[in-house]
Image (cartoon, coloured by chain):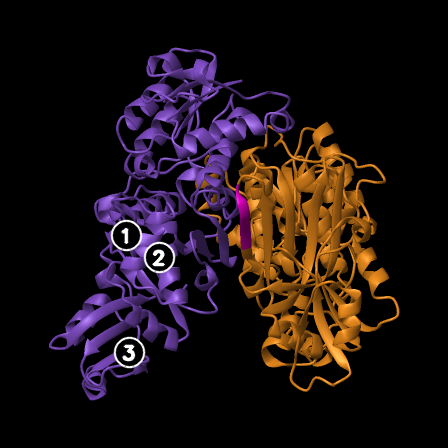
Chain colours: A purple, B orange
Amino acid sequence: MKVAVMGYGTVGSGVVEVLEKHAPSIPKKIAGETLEVKRILDLRDFPGDPHQELFTKDFNDILNDDEIRIVAETMGGVNPAFDFTAKLLKAGKSVVSSNKELVAQKGLELLNLAKENGVNYLFEASVGGGIPIIRPLNQCLAANNIEGLAGILNGTTNFILTMMIEKGMPFDEALRLAQDKGYAEKDPTADIEGHDACRKVCILASLAFGKHVYPSQVDTQGISNITLEDVSYVASADGVIKLLGQIKHISDDRIAAFVSPAVVYHGSQLASVNDVFNAILVRGDAVGDVCFYGPGAGKMPTASAVVADVIDCAKHIKRRKYFGWGAGDEDYVVDYKANIKMPFYVRAKASETEAKAKFTTVKFLSRKGQPSDEIAFITDAMTENELTEKLEGMDVINIIKVTDY
Amino acid sequence: MKVAVMGYGTVGSGVVEVLEKHAPSIPKKIAGETLEVKRILDLRDFPGDPHQELFTKDFNDILNDDEIRIVAETMGGVNPAFDFTAKLLKAGKSVVSSNKELVAQKGLELLNLAKENGVNYLFEASVGGGIPIIRPLNQCLAANNIEGLAGILNGTTNFILTMMIEKGMPFDEALRLAQDKGYAEKDPTADIEGHDACRKVCILASLAFGKHVYPSQVDTQGISNITLEDVSYVASADGVIKLLGQIKHISDDRIAAFVSPAVVYHGSQLASVNDVFNAILVRGDAVGDVCFYGPGAGKMPTASAVVADVIDCAKHIKRRKYFGWGAGDEDYVVDYKANIKMPFYVRAKASETEAKAKFTTVKFLSRKGQPSDEIAFITDAMTENELTEKLEGMDVINIIKVTDY
């Protein structure tokens, strides 16, 4: 069976490499079929690359080639990936994608197009890189009503936080180290401000609860205001600060979804997820908590997830997989600030007496070198709106959610 | 679609409960079909149970009922479960199972029967209870050559070891507590001596590498010789002792598989798996390490995995899923003692000088109250046969493998 790859960057070149390396073992998995890369689309030149005869700059070379049945889209970005993918699905080709931005923005439309045309649109690699999560959510946990999910979904920010927690490295220095190691982009905004994690939350929420969630519906906060002082206070409460995507089921018509730094206590499986690793915890009504851990990015892990989808498409070439989600209404994602109760970490220029006057129970934290006019504490569970009201008049330095995952 | 349940014990009654509870949401997952329990097979009476009209003591009531298309086998044990399952598959019914003993002993025969008869035999619940592992291994990691697996596969022994490590509770006391809590049987042999973990290793190895591995091929050691002294020495090296099932790929024709206590260093995802939880770490050539964590047993988690398989059968009622493994030859599982190099923990009545004379590099450990004539150390990587030879003449108290997972 002939395959094309669109986008010959890190992941795309990995896909070609995995397909070539595994060529001998793949036929065992798809009833004797082989998988062969016939075309690679990229506008750039790759002098010296051994695949010269496969490269094309013209999308139509793939679209109009009837031999090509499966296309791996590893271009990233919404355009032109959306246009290309839509045309391929309409032409009766299955498409697999690692493009979280596209799936988060246009998943509903593309899944519908796949359905109408009797082909598959799969995107295991779009969340958690090499970690199997899309398929387990869809199939293995089918007998559960999902109560919620929480994930460490961005490797770059997890690396930075790990350096802050384990080495006492300030945020800026940790960011520079992440850039030096190639984990963070020159412009790190998408990672640092939580936009990348937000896209993955959209995909997980859409899949877990069956209605499309768009990035604009997910309240998103990054990690740039986390300091070593916060890390230190939280450590005294036997916790760590992680950038979490959290999704909570409220009713069949309502969910909450948000991305933010969060205090995770040791004992949670998420607390020991370090460096660039990712993990996704799923809470089901029957199974309880299950957790999926692994490399959340990187050339070969992500490529192997793309190729697993290619293999799955090849297995199911004559039939569609049940898979997809519908449209949500405008109120589908509620304002978590008014609806979700949780404890909060608060750091402020204030006295313990002031805090006690505002909250019925507070747990005070401490750190080395704590100034006498600074306090930090964990509140009882309440909504963020209630918290904001209670904190009125207090000189607050930072607020961090405390997760129950 | 009509379903039958064989065996109304903990898991079987959970399966009926999950099917009933999820009845409203299941049709969304299988193109509008409902799933209804028509028969429950058990030789016992269940006075007061609301399913009286469904109970039967006669297997033929299920076998000969053409309306029943899917059967959940939650009886446990090889007989009569094997006989019943074989007859059902031959009669064109799909069977799903939580019975690890049966799958480990007879998986090859039953998968072949399913294939011959165009039906499915699924067993997600047989390993790791509610943790999705069978399907991710089979599908999501399809683009990887699996290099090895390691798992904490038995909740009872993990609970006992956790009590020893965290509470300093001696083995016997921890076992009694596990029995009081209902985690361990009155006769705890199958758990304590590693037989249960061994069956799960067989299933994982068969699936990961495509050839059936039988319990008799897996060298199995339990945890009954682990003492608080060992726990304490290992803690000084920043490690914990876990009962691990380990599988290593050697070549396309050879693997190693063994169950034993093992030293796991902090930093491994397996080190933080506590109490009755299970985890399975899979090492792929492309993805690296991925880890699946969750409740390894218990009524509802296991039942939810069985029902997920029932749902999958219902989705695929008219076609078989690619799934299965072939026969291995006699030499397929090699003697790990001669073939696998690893470091070992050794405790002995000896002097450091004696140890240094036998090993080029050793890392000495310490514990509170360590007698002056006792040493404990970690060796370099070597085979167990080499270790045994080197240790000749030394008064050894205990030896524990050190894992690289």
Chain of the residue under the numbered disc 2 shown in the image? A
Q: Is residue B323 left or right of residue A59?
A: right
Q: Residue at x 26, y 28 (%)?
A: A79
How many angstroms separate mark 3 from mark 2 (CA)?
24 Å
* Mark whose residue sits in front, 3 or 2: 2
Q: Which residue is mark 1?
A: A192
Q: Is residue B243 left or right of residue A176?
A: right
Q: Residue at x 63, y 65 (%)?
A: B48
Three-letter residue code for mark 1? Ile
* Mark whose residue sits in front, 2 or 1: 2
Q: Nearer the viewer, residue B212 or A330?
A: B212
Q: Position of residue B177 (x, y in %)?
A: 66, 78
- Above or below for A243 versus B274: above
**Would residue B365 be seen by someone viewing this image from the given angle?**
yes
Q: Position of residue B232 (x, y in %)?
A: 65, 77
**Would residue B7 be seen by someone viewing this image from the given angle?**
no
Q: Nearer the viewer, residue B73 or A374?
A: A374
Q: Mark 2 or mark 1: which comes first in sequence?
A: 2
Residues flagged by tags 2 and 1 on a common chain? yes
Circle 1 sits in a helix, a strand or a loop, which is it? helix
Q: Position of residue A168 (x, y in %)?
A: 36, 67
Q: Mark 3 or mark 1: which comes first in sequence?
A: 1
- Above or below for A195 versus A395: above
How many angstroms separate mark 2 from mark 1 (CA)?
9 Å
Quarter-of-image position of residue B77: bottom right
Q: Which residue is mark 2?
A: A160
Tell me which segment is drawn in magenta. B287-292
- Above or below for B16 versus A236: above
Chain of the residue under the numbered disc 1 shown in the image? A
Residue A118 is inside the magenta segment: no
Three-letter residue code for mark 2? Ile
